[in-house]
Amino acid sequence: MDKLGILLALVAGCAIALQPAVNARLAGQCGHPLQASIISFGTGFVALLLVGAAMRIGFPEPGRLQLLPLWAWSGGLLGTYMVTVSLLFAPRLGATRWIALVIAGQFALSLILDHFGAGYAQHAISPLRIAGVLCVAIGVYLVMTN
């Protein structure tokens, strides 16, 4: 296994747990949660521009982007949904409940995406994989009832 990839994935998981709290604090100073989303994505956009400039990446050629199917443009919309919904509900649910629900949703859809190889390496649904997702569902139930 790729140890660096595993470590970075764990750190990304920590960032996912921390981001709603950071954004909720930001939203507390704004008049509306969407304003906090705009600021959050704005600072992320500026950071990406700076990193891209430092690495001399630049923008893709327009001709390459025209070949993309419409669904390939949805990543930013999905991120906007995630940040905005987390701003609205994570503070009320609490970190553990919020993350448990997010992980359950990720596991459920990931099982299907892997089975069909939709954007990922193909891994068939198996009884053990289903059992793993059911264990996550049981964990969500336990977290939600406490």
Image (cartoon, rainbow, N blue to C red):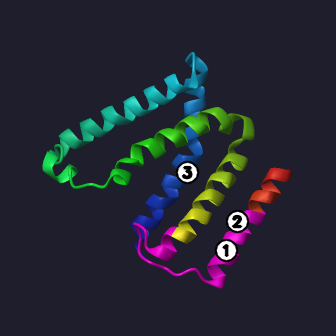
Q: Residue at x 44, y 26 (%)?
A: 39
Q: Which label is found at residue 132?
A: 1
Q: Nearer the viewer, residue 65 or 101?
A: 65
Q: Which residue is mark 3?
A: 14
The single residue placed furthest to the right in the displayed view is 146
Q: Quadrant of residue 86?
A: top right
Labels 1 and 3 touching (C-beta < 8 A): no
Residue 69 is inside the magenta segment: no
Q: Is residue 112 left or right of residue 59?
A: right
Q: Which residue is mark 2?
A: 136
Q: Residue at x 57, y 15 (%)?
A: 31
Q: Please tell me how crowded label 1 is: few (under 14), some (14-19), or many (20+) other residues with Cα within 10 Å.
A: some
* Residue type beneath disc 1: Gly
Give how far across and how far down residue 87 sits, in percent. Answer: 60, 33
* Residue type beneath disc 3: Cys
Residue 129 is inside the magenta segment: yes
Magenta range is 113-138
Q: Is residue 73 left or right of residue 20?
A: left
Give how far across and how far down residue 129 sits, in percent. Answer: 62, 78
Q: Is residue 66 left or right of residue 17?
A: left
Give how far across and how far down residue 10 sits, in percent. Answer: 52, 59
- Which element is circle 1 on? helix
The single residue placed furthest to the top in the displayed view is 31
